[in-house]
């Protein structure tokens, strides 16, 4: 399995391509004489698009970028985050797959030299005028935008909910036995929740600087339960 096989272009990545390619929601004839719609999608035989929504255009685009996704997965061997993958797919959507085959962009990415990738992308902002390579400001702006996306930090993952231990009669009996030995519980060990158990657990958690959780009658933090069991 390749390093990036699990990735597909995100909605943000599709929006990024759309921003630079343009979006037309009505069928039109492109300069090459082909019926086109959405984000430069050439209408294929069997497709009868006349007017579409932006969401439909993004859905169509998601299919159109699949071959570019495959190219990134084939030629980029270093694991990428979502922004990096989106940036490279958007880049070769514009330049063609040759943008990441034996190029400075490919070498920088595969060597893990991510800091130099924006500059390598900007090298693809020129075109020939009378045989002379000149910088095209529009292409340069697009390359800068792709570089910014490539270097954009990925949001920190959402907080993982704390692990909880749900009370059973058996686990509560074990807890009561532990609390009894510690002198914190004075009642009968019966595996039933009551004021004595509640007070004993609260005192234990305060002594250890731990928390019971929001519903200690039903469940407590596994960290607290394990601390009690190891006491």
Image (spheres, helix red, strand yellow):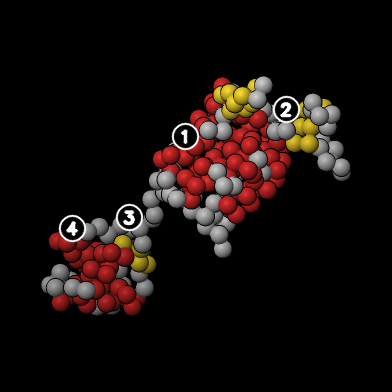
Q: Residues under labels 3 and 4: Cα distance?
A: 16 Å
Asked whether residue 140 is in view, the answer is: yes
Marks 4 and 2, Cα distance to the nearest angstrom? 61 Å
From the viewer's perspective, is the residue at label 2 or at label 3 nearer?
A: 2
In the rendered image, which residue does mark 2 sit on?
24
Residue matched to label 4: 209
Relative side of 27 to 138, left or right: right
Q: Residue at x 54, y 40 (%)?
A: 87
Q: Position of residue 32 (x, y in %)?
A: 81, 29
The C terminus: image quadrant: bottom left
Above or below, comparing residue 54 to residue 113 in the picture: above
Residue 164 quadrant: bottom left
Residue count near mark 4 (Cα–Cα under 10 Å), binned few <14, some 14–19, many ≥20:
few
Secondary structure under tag 4 reads loop
Distance, label 1 to label 2, CA atoms, is 31 Å
Mark 1 or mark 3, earlier in chain: 1
Q: Which of 117/15 is in front?
A: 117
Using the rendered view, name the quadrant where residue 28 is placed. Answer: top right
Q: Quadrant of the N terminus?
A: bottom right
| Of callouts 4 and 1, the N-terminal one | 1
Quadrant for residue 184, please give it: bottom left
Whole-angstrom CA distance, mark 2 to mark 3, is: 52 Å
Mark 3, Cα crowd under 10 Å, few <14 / some 14-19 / many 20+, is few
State the residue at coordinates (28%, 77%): 173
Residue at 27%, 59% (x, y): give it: 212
Q: Earlier in the sequence, mark 3 or mark 4?
A: 4
Q: Which residue is mark 1?
A: 119
Secondary-structure class at tag 3: loop
- Badge nearest the viewer, 1 or 3: 1
- Crowdedness of circle 1 by 10 Å Cα count: few (<14), some, many (20+)? some
> Circle 3 sits on which residue?
214
> In this rendering, which labeled residue sits more in front, label 3 or label 4?
4
């Amino acid at each position: 399995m390749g390093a990036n096989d699990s990735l597909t272009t995100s909605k943000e990545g599709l929006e990024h391509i759309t921003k630079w390619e343009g979006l037309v929601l009505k069928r039109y004839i492109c300069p090459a004489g082909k019926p086109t719609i959405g984000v430069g999608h050439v209408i294929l035989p069997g497709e009868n698009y006349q007017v579409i929504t932006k969401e439909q255009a993004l859905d169509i685009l998601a299919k159109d970028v699949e071959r570019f996704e495959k190219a990134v997965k084939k030629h980029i061997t270093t694991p990428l985050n979502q922004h990096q993958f989106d940036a490279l797919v958007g880049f070769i959507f514009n330049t063609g797959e040759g943008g990441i085959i034996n190029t400075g962009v490919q070498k920088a990415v595969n060597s893990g030299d991510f800091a130099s990738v924006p500059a390598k992308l900007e090298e693809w902002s020129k075109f020939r005028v009378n045989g002379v390579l000149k910088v095209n400001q529009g292409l340069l702006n697009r390359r800068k935008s792709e570089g910014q996306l490539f270097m954009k930090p990925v949001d920190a993952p959402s907080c993982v909910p704390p692990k909880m231990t749900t009370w059973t009669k058996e686990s509560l009996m074990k807890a009561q036995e532990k609390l009894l030995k510690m002198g914190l519980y004075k009642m009968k060990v019966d595996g039933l929740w009551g004021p004595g158990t509640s007070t004993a657990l609260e005192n234990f958690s305060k002594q250890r600087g731990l928390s019971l959780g929001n519903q200690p009658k039903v469940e407590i933090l596994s960290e607290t339960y394990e601390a009690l069991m190891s006491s």
